[in-house]
Image (cartoon, helix red, strand yellow):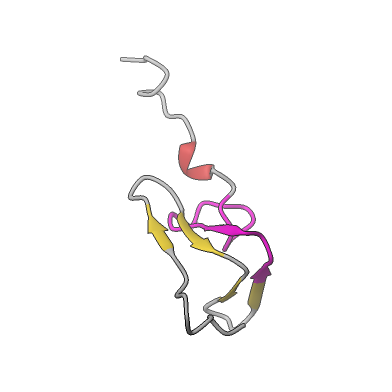
Amino acid sequence: MANSPERPRRVTIDPDGPMLVEGPVEVVCADGTVATSRRFTAAICTCRRSRIYPWCDTSHRRRTDRDQGAT
């Protein structure tokens, strides 16, 4: 998929979450496979915890004992 020359893709980076890319988008993975999203915005996993990698499934939000109030 080629980007439109009159308007570049917008990428939003959240240090505590996924990278949001205006879609549609193709992601080429390290092994050469290509993942495609036709959504208006694709959430790309940056923590590598996602079960549907390269797409974000909000695994970065996993609770820890500290989050639940344990001391």
- Nearer to us in this view, 4 or 62: 4
How many labels sit on residues? 0
Percent of width and height locating residue 45: 50, 57
Determine whether 10 is above or below 68 in the image: below
Determine whether 60 is above or below 7 in the image: above
Range covered by the magenta-colored residues: 36-56
Determine whether 37 is above or below 56 in the image: below
Horizontally, residue 23 falls left or right of residue 19, namely right
Looking at the image, which residue is at 42% across and 29% down?
64
For the N terminus, the image quarter is bottom right
Percent of width and height locating residue 48: 48, 57
| Magenta stretch prevailing secondary structure | loop
Looking at the image, which residue is at 64% across and 80% down?
33
User: Residue farthest to the front?
Assistant: 6
For the C terminus, the image quarter is top left
Horizontally, residue 67 falls left or right of residue 43, namely left
Looking at the image, which residue is at 64% across and 56% down?
52
Percent of width and height locating residue 29: 55, 76
